[in-house]
Image: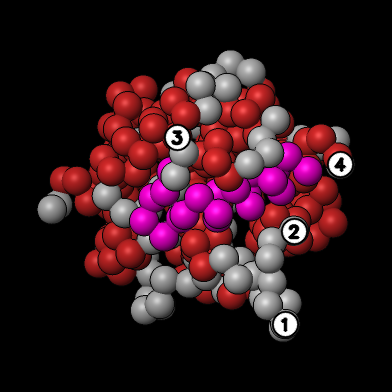
Amino acid sequence: MIKLQEGLKSELDSLVLKYETKDFIKDDPVQFIHLFKNREDVEIAGLLAALFAYGKREVFIKKLNTLFNLMEMRPYEFIQNFDSVSLLDDFNYRFIKPDDLAAFFNSYKKLITKDKITLEELFFNGYKKTGDVFGCLQHVCDYFYEGTPKDATGVCTLAGYKFMLSNPKNKGAMKRLNMFLRWMVRRNSPVDIGLWNFIKPTELFIPLDVHVGNISRGLGLLNRKQNDARAVFELTSKLREFDPNDPVKYDFALFGYGINNK
């Protein structure tokens, strides 16, 4: 068993070296954080790219290009001055409709104009308050849900918004926000930018979706059948055995394994 694990670690390590390269960027949503130099633009571009990263890759990347062109490649300034859903020109992507995006932009505008804090500070406050990554994500989601329209029970009535910004309290995998944190936290990477340093790479969780879940089960890295928070904890714990300092680097390996073993 030890030899099998050593062999798997060796294979995964080689796949990390193969796929964690600058060439990875052009076909991945991470490309959008590399389009901007201004810190505030990078943060909002990264968060938007992560939240839209579902469905066929080529489709949502095309949609994101449309969205950033609509914002005239100045996302921070666009949100800072956002005042009407009409500015979105009926932009939508699958479950996400103009009203969903407008609600998100209004919350982001409140963050930077009324509360006068950055996205990094919002995440930092959540991390400082809770001491862990999923608690941090809950804090962030609570903020962005605060101003949304709600029914009599206090539940957000925007279906697309709830899909776009999954709530950690539902015990889901939080794939897209964990991916966003990978981009923003991991340093010394040709792909991830390591802009934030209040979270350590050792604390990150693997971005888990159906594809990664299936591959991980096939490799014996994951036993849990559901792709939920418990599966994320289980898989990340296993990957920490391979590299306790940087477990989510294996996101590249699992991606590469899927490409090589279609």
The residue singled out by tag 1 in the image is: 152
Q: Nearer the viewer, mark 2 or mark 4?
A: 2
- Cα gap from disc 1 to disc 2, whole angstroms: 15 Å
Disc nearest the viewer among 4 and 3: 3
Circle 1: element type: loop
Q: Amino acid at mark 4?
A: Asp
Q: Position of residue 60 (x, y in %)?
A: 34, 43
Most foreground residue, 210 or 164: 164
Q: Main secondary structure of the magenta part?
A: helix
Q: Say whether disc 1 or disc 3 marks the residue closer to the N-terminus.
A: 3
Q: Secondary structure at mark 3?
A: helix
Could you tell me the amino acid type at mark 2? Gly
What colour scheme has been applied to the protein in the rendered image?
A: secondary structure
Image spot of residue 232 (x, y percent): 49, 65
In three-dimensional space, the C-alpha distance between marks 4 and 1, rounded to whole angstroms, equals: 27 Å
Contact (Cβ within 8 Å) of mark 4 with mark 1: no
In front: label 4 or label 1:
1
Q: In this picture, which residue range is highlighted in magenta?
A: 91-110
- Indicate which disc residue 181 carries: none
Q: Give the crowd class for mark 3: few <14, some 14-19, many >=20 residues within 10 Å.
A: many
Mark 4 or mark 3: whose residue is earlier in sequence: 3
- Distance, label 2 to label 4, CA atoms, is 13 Å
Query: Which amino acid type corresponds to the residue marked 3 in the rendered image?
Result: Leu
**Circle 3 sits on which residue?**
67
- Report if residue 109 lies within the magenta region: yes
Is residue 121 part of the magenta span, yes or no?
A: no
Secondary structure, mark 2, is loop
Q: Which residue is mark 4?
A: 115
Name which of mark 3 and mark 2 comes first in the sequence.
3
Give the labeled residue for mark 2. 147
